[in-house]
Amino acid sequence: MSAVVVQAARAWIGTPYVHQGSVRGAGTDCLGLVRGIWRELCGAEPEGMPAYTPDWGEVGGAELLLGGAERQLLPAPDERPGDVLVFRMRAGAIAKHMGILAETGERASFVHAYDRHGVVESPLSTPWRARIAGRFRFPAA
């Protein structure tokens, strides 16, 4: 399943960034990317999405993104391509970003929707790794 997830994620590269969007080629944000991959591989989305802000530095409040991942995805005890990574962008902030692990090892990378850049594949550098708040897998389709 991991290669299929990576292939699906890479198919979204070049999609423009649109807050709360989830349409490949038209517009998506980081959650929309994962939602779109879910629809492609698993079928209908299991729950509706509440409204959410684009503020990565949001402090306090509920961990909606992390909680949703914990409810709908499987925990990933080790690192594999296709994992869904959830990021906390700064200490004390709630988790507000996610992406798909594309490569591991020395050339580790992940696919994510990034404001002003759209969907891109970025190196999973040390600063990005330090922000990982959770690692999950899609259930088998």
Image (cartoon, rainbow, N blue to C red):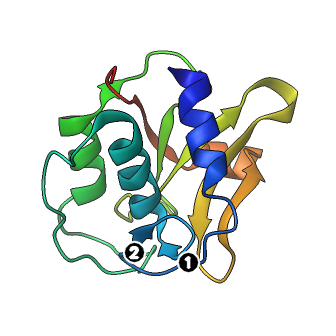
Q: Residue farthest to the right? A: 106
Q: Is residue 119 left or right of residue 59?
A: right
- Tag 1: residue type? Tyr
Q: Is residue 96 visible?
A: no
Residue at image coords 70%, 52%: 127
Residue 103 higher or lower than 65, as above or below: above
Within 10 Å of the Cα at label 2, are there few (<14), some (14-19), or many (20+) other Cα atoms?
some
Q: Nearer the viewer, residue 56 or 118?
A: 118
Can you tell which quarter of the image residue 20 is in?
Answer: bottom left
Res 63 label: none
- Tag 2: residue type? Gly
Residue named by callout 2: 21
Q: Nearer the viewer, residue 91 or 34?
A: 34
Q: Is residue 45 left or right of residue 118?
A: left
Task: Answer whether labels 1 and 2 touch (C-beta < 8 Å).
Answer: yes
Residue 118: x and y in percent read 64, 73
Residue at image coords 61%, 70%: 15
Residue 57 higher or lower than 47, as above or below: below
Residue named by callout 1: 17
Q: Is residue 115 visible?
A: yes
Tell how many labels: 2
Quarter holding the C terminus is top left
